[in-house]
Image: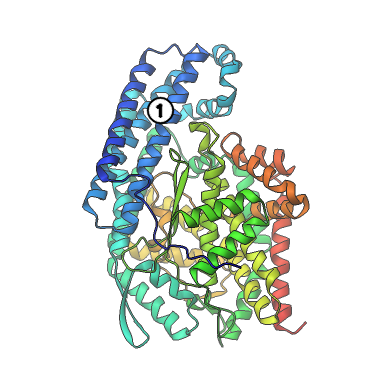
Amino acid sequence: MQKHKYPQKWDLDSLFKTLGELAQHIALTEHMVDNLVAEAETANIHNPYETKKLLDSLGDIRIHLSQASSFTACLIAQNSRDPDALSLQGKTAALNSRYDKSEKLVQSKMTTLTSDAWEQLLAAEELDDYRFLLNEWRKKAKWQLSEKEEKLLADLSVDGYHAWGQFYQTLMSSIKISIQLDGTEKEMSVGQAINLRSHPDRTVRKRAHDALEGALKEKEELFAKVLNHIAGFRLEMYKRRGIDNVLEVPLQENRITKETLVTMWNAVTKYKAVFAGYLDHKAKLFGNDKLQSYDFWAPATSTPQEIPFDEAAEFIIEHFGALGTEMKDFARHAFENRWVEAEDRSGKAGSAFCAGFPLSGESRISMTYGRSISNVLTLAHELGHAFHNHTMKPVGGLNRYYPMSLAETASTFSELAILNAAYEKADSWEDKRFILDEKLKRSVMNFMNIHARFLFEERFYKERQSGYVPAERLNKLMREAMDEAYMDSFGSPSARSWIWTPHFYLTKSPFYNFPYTFGYLFSQSIYASAKTKGPEFEKSYINLLRDSGKMTVEELVMQHLGGDITTPGFWEKGLQLCAREAEEFLGLDNGL
């Protein structure tokens, strides 16, 4: 097979050649918002044609905004101190706020319609593609404030709310961690230090764990202020909107019911014991009663295989191809056209992400590639996000935006496909054990670690309602959540993981945690469908992704998989598959 050389630095110039070009794009988008506001004020909302025109304009503006916001995020990810990028990020944040106000203006006009007028409007053929979205807006009308109050909140959020989220990214990217490695003191980013969790040398893993905890301890009060200010603003905003439970908004935005979420967590808890047994078994391999957190990502073999970036790219391309030609061609195009920033260097963003550029129909991926199987899977995960973006190109602007639960389904499915392919390719006991261990790590992360994040965030917001929560208390909440979620089977958990978990600092919505567990289990069902459908799978999968912005998740699963996610049985099918893998791993180690 011909060997390819894939670049590890992304190409941003093909999106905007200069910062001046980006500034012109932002100015154009501002003009589009001005025109929309003028149209919205005079539009006859009873007229389906005029309503459709407004909705089309909103979608078009959103696409232009995403293009600018994603670009500035990429600039800051590669250099957190770029003053021009930080300035443009401020401009795009302000423009996003203006867009939010214009969208709320359109929504407020919609919600003034009587029930009869509303039904008549929805019956119009012109609005077929927007019917689900309009009904969602109608449900959210109870949260709507007066136009004056909405404007005030939007204005305050730019420098108060969203600015704290942006400050977190800048602060995290600026942290330098000194670690003794290969006989020399090396300065690393948070992302590089986290990558050392899978280093084969236990001394290096512990050293990286301690150095990361030490660096974060020095700044924990500063991070506590950031987190408290984000949560405080959110709670005040929700209070003004009449939202009593902070979980109400993420449930609505994820388009799932509380019944579904409770059913999923109950099913997960029912099956946790087998994964606690897996952790206890691994602890004994390291000579401990409990598995130390810095040993969790340790390779299952003493000489783990290092995987060059080019080899990882070829493996992903090949096995995306087993799912369909479009996925294979897409992955190759992404690698060949420099959509991935994978270079292992300091100064980069600590966490991997995928940024969508809907105007040009592209994506960009940022990560720190450290040649481990974990890095390969992260790469596949982010490409799953990018493929989801790719499938949405024919979809209208407003319907391109899907909930986090489904975003994490697409990414986790891609990761699962690569992991299963690696397992099927393994031909020795040692290789099978290594890959099976990697699969189980992901089950533990989704069933235990993500549950810990959920419990932490739920309890933090409850306490934040009564006032400021200091760093010491946040550390205690994190430890308690970890002990409960891991069934007390984890030693030395990172009490400061609330600092290096960026999801707690997202200003769009709280509780960016349960969507991962949802996506992990949902992806198991989709993968099972891929195995049974064969060549027909890719078409049905793309249709599912394209519908991800047009219906509730309960409706989507029922329509495309015939499953009822409000029942324990749906979740237990995936959990049983994962539990069998834990039993198989223990069987391999016991020589069965």
Name the residue nearer the viewer: 211 or 525.
525
**Left or right: where does residue 209 sit relative to residue 156?**
right
**Left or right: where does residue 572 sit relative to residue 303?**
right
Residue located at (31% from left, 36% from top): 25
Coordinates of residue 532 in the picture (x, y in percent): 78, 52
Coordinates of residue 406 in the picture (x, y in percent): 57, 46
Query: Compared with residue 414, is residue 237 higher up or lower down, i.e. above or below?
Result: above
Q: Is residue 208 visible?
A: yes
The quarter of the rendered structure image containing the N terminus is bottom right
**Left or right: where does residue 312 sit relative to residue 494?**
right
Looking at the image, what colour scheme do you see? rainbow
Name the residue nearer the viewer: 294 or 462.
294
Coordinates of residue 159 in the picture (x, y in percent): 26, 42
Bin the neighbour count of mark 1 within 10 Å (Cα to Cα): few under 14, some 14-19, many 20 and up. many
Q: Is residue 145 visible?
A: no
Q: Quadrant of residue 345?
A: bottom left
The quarter of the rendered structure image containing the C terminus is bottom right
Which residue matches tag 1?
103
Name the residue nearer the viewer: 487 or 23.
23
**Left or right: where does residue 5 sit relative to residue 266?**
left
Name the residue at the front extreme.
2
Query: Compared with residue 142, is residue 581 higher up or lower down, i.e. above or below?
Result: below
Residue located at (66% from left, 37% from top): 555
Coordinates of residue 557 in the picture (x, y in percent): 68, 42
Number of numbered labels in the structure image: 1
Q: Amino acid at mark 1?
A: Glu
Query: Compared with residue 68, is residue 117 higher up or lower down, i.e. above or below?
Result: above
Residue located at (56% from left, 20% from top): 127
Residue located at (50% from left, 11% from top): 47
Query: Compared with residue 367, is residue 207 higher up or lower down, i.e. above or below?
Result: below
Secondary structure at badge 1 equals helix
